[in-house]
Image: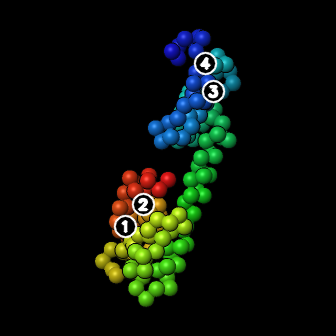
Amino acid sequence: AALDPSHDARATCDGSSAADDSPCVWCPMAEGGGAASAGACLSNEEAILADGKFGIACPRHIYLKPAEAEVKRGLPDVNCFKAAWVADNAESACGESSDKDGASCVWCQTDGDAMGACLSKFEAGMADGKLGLKCPNGDAAALEETL
């Protein structure tokens, strides 16, 4: 259907979603690149990488908006941190505490040490395996559930 001259590829792209549920981005051919309707329908991530390459130009205002929302969601949840900070037994206090969304906090232990950090499930999903932290359920599926 994309080769059919009556088919509006841009309209189809604008109404589509990528595999990660982000809106697809229409990246037209740069000026002088051929027909006015020529371009590529890309995911936000692909648009970021392809902008200015391959003769296409991707509109920044479309693909930066979801990235900004992701940053806002990734801001530290201080509820879990504070619960462990003031407790006599930080690990126990962490397990009994809730993050700002009401979900249970997660205790992430440092390698070979009794110390650790009390994090939200979202933060634990990002921190697992980094900075010497081992977090239960610190896998991509747990991270996806919190988004």
**Residue at the spot of label 3:** 28
- Label 3 to label 2: alpha-carbon separation: 36 Å
Q: Is the C-beta separation of discs 1 and 2 under 8 Å?
A: yes
Circle 1 sits in a helix, a strand or a loop, which is it? loop
Q: In the rendering, at what x and y percent does residue 48 appear?
A: 57, 41
- Label 3 to label 1: alpha-carbon separation: 43 Å
Upstream in sequence: badge 3 or badge 2:
3
- Label 4 to label 1: alpha-carbon separation: 48 Å
Residue under the point 35% across and 61% down:
137
Q: Is residue 50 at all visible to an observer of this figure? A: no
Pick the residue in front: 49 or 25.
25
**Residue at the spot of label 2:** 125
Q: In the rendering, at what x and y percent does residue 97 appear?
A: 46, 74
Type of colouring: rainbow
| Disc 4 residue type (three-letter) | Asp
**Residue at the spot of label 1:** 135
- Label 1 to label 2: alpha-carbon separation: 8 Å
| Disc 2 residue type (three-letter) | Gly
Residue under the point 59% across and 34% down:
25
Camera-near label (4 vs 3) is: 4
Residue under the point 40% across and 85% down:
89
Check disc 1: other Cα within 10 Å, few if <14, some if 14-19, many if 20+. Answer: many
Q: Is the C-beta separation of discs 4 and 3 under 8 Å?
A: no
Pick the residue in front: 2 or 96.
96
Q: In the rendering, at what x and y percent does residue 14 appear?
A: 60, 30
Check disc 2: other Cα within 10 Å, few if <14, some if 14-19, many if 20+. Answer: many
Check disc 3: other Cα within 10 Å, few if <14, some if 14-19, many if 20+. Answer: many
Circle 2 sits in a helix, a strand or a loop, which is it? helix
Circle 3 sits in a helix, a strand or a loop, which is it? strand
| Disc 3 residue type (three-letter) | Pro
**Residue at the spot of label 4:** 8
